[in-house]
Image (cartoon, helix red, strand yellow):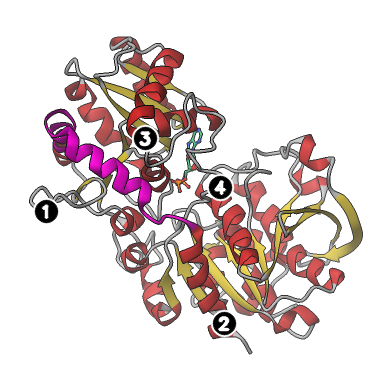
Amino acid sequence: MKIAFIGSECYPFVKTGGLGDVMYALPRALVREGCEARVILPLYNCIPDKFKEKMVYQGSFMMDLTSDGRTFYVGIMESVMDGVTYDFIDNREFFDWGNPYTGLWEDIPKYCFFSKASLAILNYLDWIPDIVHCHDWQAGLVPLYLRTKFDSTPVGRARSIVTIHNLRFQGICGIEHLKYWSGLSDMLFDYPVLKHNENEANMFKGGLAYADRVTTVSSTYAREIQTPDYGEGLDGHLRYHSGKLSGIVNGIDVELWDSAADKLLAAQYDRNSVLACKPLNKNALQKALGLEPDGEKMILGLISRLTDQKGLDLVNDILPHLIDGNTQVVVLGTGDPRYENAFRYYESKYKGTVCAYISYNEGLAHQIYAGADALLVPSLFEPCGLTQLIAMRYGTIPIVRETGGLKDTVEPYNWDEDTGNGFSFNWYDSGLLLGAINQAKSLFFTERARWDKMVCRDMEKDVSWERSAAQYLELYRSLER
Ligand code: ADP
């Protein structure tokens, strides 16, 4: 089976969040299952030179795009890594700036071009997939192009799947702007497809309507987005299409996230050595971040984009209540200045106890996953969430809100039966978050043997891609012609 993955980011070339991880791990897992996988990405300027240097030119052509028939250069640069072929679409006009995103006004033309060029290069390369698997709004137009402009071309035989990683971002803009840049027929700009409201069009909405199947990254999120609270305005549209909507929870790449071979750690460990090694990693983390180097302290970590989605207002509300002489807090993230400044303030107020590392730093993320005792993920909504999975893999106990993939992957600790993987709370309320943290603290400080058992249990939990990849494969097969 041949699958083309179309999306706007993919680790290690370019990544701003979980989408980048999925675009990396899922194709690799499918290749291990015997599939052929190609990943199609924009050749952004921000992709590091070390990757660009290894790419090989495969050809180029001109492609018409806009409603007035303007044509644009499409170059194809390719590299192969661990059995997965990566095709990068080259066009300086669209991809020369941004990290990789710019602003919606520029991103709309950029991803119209990308969506259409992705199908065009498959024809050009004469590599015709069974499935085009499109990710998030940036690839939202692919199913529409597939069933219109490409329907009677070789790639038209492919079936399409759209995966929703985050419904908050939909690619909404003025109808005329999208009509011009997509070159799609006026007929599609009606309410069941691309029309969002009187004046606006919605790329994601169109893709969801035209896709053969829609998936999202957890079953709970698949249910949640059909309600007004989580539907981001598309709940009615999703309820209408609910027959083709399902949830498949993400995994993590267990080679990339392998505490036993992680060179970034002060001490590598597996399930048998975690209890001996965690203190060493904790000590190294405390030293690296200027925290009081005290092995008795409980470290609460938070690794996140600093946006409203991640429940940071709850954390800000209660942070002073966490400072009890026995607890340290480490925040790694960038984003909304409101949160960046709040965490910086807490760091200066509680020097040596709170650290706010306001930046994107892969290495430090690994060290926090290994050195912290618990990880906070109190999201307002969370389609799947990867940080809780990585945390468990590294023997760090997740404290999560029961939403989306957090609910599907973290079984709350049961005091009576001594089972579970973490701590959780349901309503979006800072008091409840504090309650969950206090429960974790009770277990950590008063019932350490039970805590340690949970650490080992979490490290053993299967959070790998293999299970998810098998479910995707089943879905692809169900679409085979
Ligand atoms: P989202 O995709 O909504 O940002 P996920 O939990 O799905 O959230 O994925 C977040 C990914 O990004 C994880 O791999 C996490 O380790 C990583 N990450 C987030 N913020 C940072 C940061 N500041 N530095 C390093 N890694 C980060």
The image position of residue 27, as x and y in percent, is 62, 61
Which is nearer the eye, 299 or 424?
Answer: 299
User: Which tag, 1 or 3, sits closer to the chain's start?
Assistant: 3
Q: Nearer the viewer, mark 1 or mark 2?
A: 1
Compared across the picture, whether 197 is left or right of 399 comes to right
Compared across the picture, whether 99 is left or right of 66 comes to left
Residue 403 marker: none
Q: What residue is pinned by disc 3?
A: 274
Magenta highlight range: 438-464
How far is disc 4 from disc 2 in space, using C-alphas?
Answer: 27 Å
Residue type at mark 2: give it.
Answer: Arg
Q: What residue is pinned by disc 2?
A: 477
Which is nearer the eye, 112 or 331?
Answer: 331
Residue 255 marker: 4
Do residues under tags 1 and 2 come within 8 Å of each other at their CB atoms?
A: no
How far is disc 1 from disc 3 in space, using C-alphas?
Answer: 23 Å
Q: Residues within 10 Å of mark 4 (few under 14, many from 20)?
A: few
Do residues under tags 3 and 2 come within 8 Å of each other at their CB atoms?
A: no
Q: Secondary structure at mark 2?
A: helix
